[in-house]
Image (cartoon, helix red, strand yellow):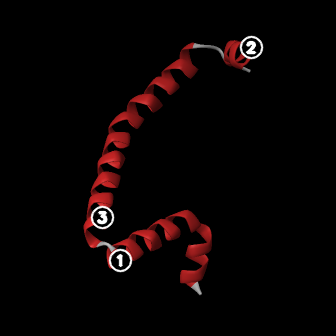
Amino acid sequence: MKIIERIKKSKLLFFVALAYGTLFIVVPETAVQSFGNSVYYLKEMLEILPVIFLLTVIIEAWVPKEVIMKRFG
């Protein structure tokens, strides 16, 4: 039952893993290339995201919330 509950909680992750598993069985060369591309893009995002989070925190600290709400909605 725990496995079914986890699948229900993370449906997207389950379907992506299922797609990769199917791809590895049907077309292994394409699956390896696809997995390599996914790892590359994940690494790229993990390099950029901390900087974006830091800038967001700095902007929220320096600019009053009312100004942000007034200008951006």
Position of residue 50 measured from the top left corner of the image (x, y, whole percent):
39, 35
Position of residue 49 measured from the top left corner of the image (x, y, whole percent):
41, 36
> Label 2: which residue?
70
- Regarding mark 2 in the picture, which secondary structure is present there? helix
Q: Any mark on residue 30, and which?
A: 3
- Regarding mark 3 in the picture, which secondary structure is present there? helix
Position of residue 59 measured from the top left corner of the image (x, y, whole percent):
53, 19
Query: What amino acid does circle 3 point to?
Result: Thr
Residue 4 visible in rendering: yes
What residue is rendered at 27% in x and 59% in y?
33
Q: Residues within 10 Å of mark 1 (few under 14, many from 20)?
A: few
> Label 1: which residue?
26
Q: Is residue 48 above or below residue 70?
A: below
What residue is rendered at 51% in x and 26% in y?
57
Mark 1 or mark 2, earlier in chain: 1
| Quadrant of image for the N terminus | bottom right
**In this rendering, the label closer to the viewer, 3 or 2:** 3
